Amino acid sequence: MRVVRVYQDEDVRYGLADESTVTLISDEPFAAWEAEGIVPLSHAQLLAPVIPTKIVCVGINYRKHAQEMGHNLPVEPVIFLKPPTSINGPQGEIRIPEGAERVDFEGELAAVIGRRTHKVSPGEAMSHILGFVCANDVTARDIQKRDGQWTRAKGFDTFCPVGPWVETDVDPLDLEIQTYLNGELKQSARTSDMIFNVYELVSFISGVMTLLPGDIVLTGTPSGVGPMEAGDVVEVRIEGVGSLVNRVV
């Protein structure tokens, strides 16, 4: 099942998509809902598929990326937050902020929480996840180095594209993840190369903070991160999930 959020008839609606249509539903996908009509997928304006109360990110979670960044392998997940106002949707514009000299792409698999999640085990985490999306943890790398921490560099508006939908029927433990810049492959890995898998991450994070329906957990980026410039098109493509495309302005 693909959960989408669309702009339809001057209103924002949730729906369930297949290869050609969107079935509009009466409420959020986390609640009881009824079907309320069908529209062609080609006519639907896809938005970010959920609006989270928080975006929890994981750094240094692929071995080769840790080497690329000159970090030792972590003994427990390294987590940080992006603000909900950084959310961006499929085909949305990534805006380079004034004063940023280098803005990088970081393609990632992200989990969308489906119900209240507090101190769950890795085995329990699976039933607390609605599904998975493609994500891009956009980072102003020069600002990150100047600040010595990550909040400002990763928190600008438009710096968290997610989408194109929440795919509920996929096993996240061994998926191909790729990032393309202007059609050129830049990142390529499998999620099985993660240091901590999705369920371990959700379990760990839920021991720190309660996760709520719609919250998003970005699970880290593989090696190959690099800069984008105005006019570039970046695509995050994940096997079994979908393709997230954004233009840089």
Image: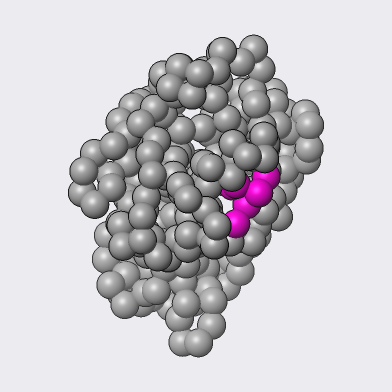
- Figure disc tally: 0
For image coordinates 50% across by 87% down, the residue present is 10
Work out which residue is located at the far left of the displayed protein and give it: 183
- Drawn side of residue 147 relative to residue 33, left or right: right
In this rendered view, identify the residue nearer to me: 80 or 98.
98
Mostly what secondary structure, the magenta segment? helix
Q: Residue at coordinates 66% horizontally, 17% vertically from top-left? A: 76
Colour mode of the rendering: one colour
Q: Is residue 141 above or below residue 248?
A: above
- Please indicate, yes or no, whether residue 167 appears anywhere in the rendered image: yes
Q: If the image is split into quadrants, where does the C terminus sit?
A: bottom left
Locate residue 192 relative to residue 112 in the image: left or right. left
Residue 236 covered by magenta stretch: no
Camera sees residue 115: no
Looking at the image, residue 76 sits to the left or right of residue 70; the answer is right
Residue 8 place in picture, x, y as percent:
45, 81
**Residue at image coords 52%, 41%:** 141
Give the percent coordinates (x, y) of residue 181. 28, 47
Closer to us: 24 or 6: 6
State which region is magenta.
151-156
Residue at the image point whose x is 36% and y is 61% from the top: 230
Q: Quadrant of residue 157?
A: bottom right
Q: Is residue 205 above or below residue 156?
A: above
- At which x and y percent is residue 69? 49, 24
**How far from the left and from the top, in percent, is residue 191?**
41, 27
Give the answer, above or below, for where 186 lies relative to 32: above
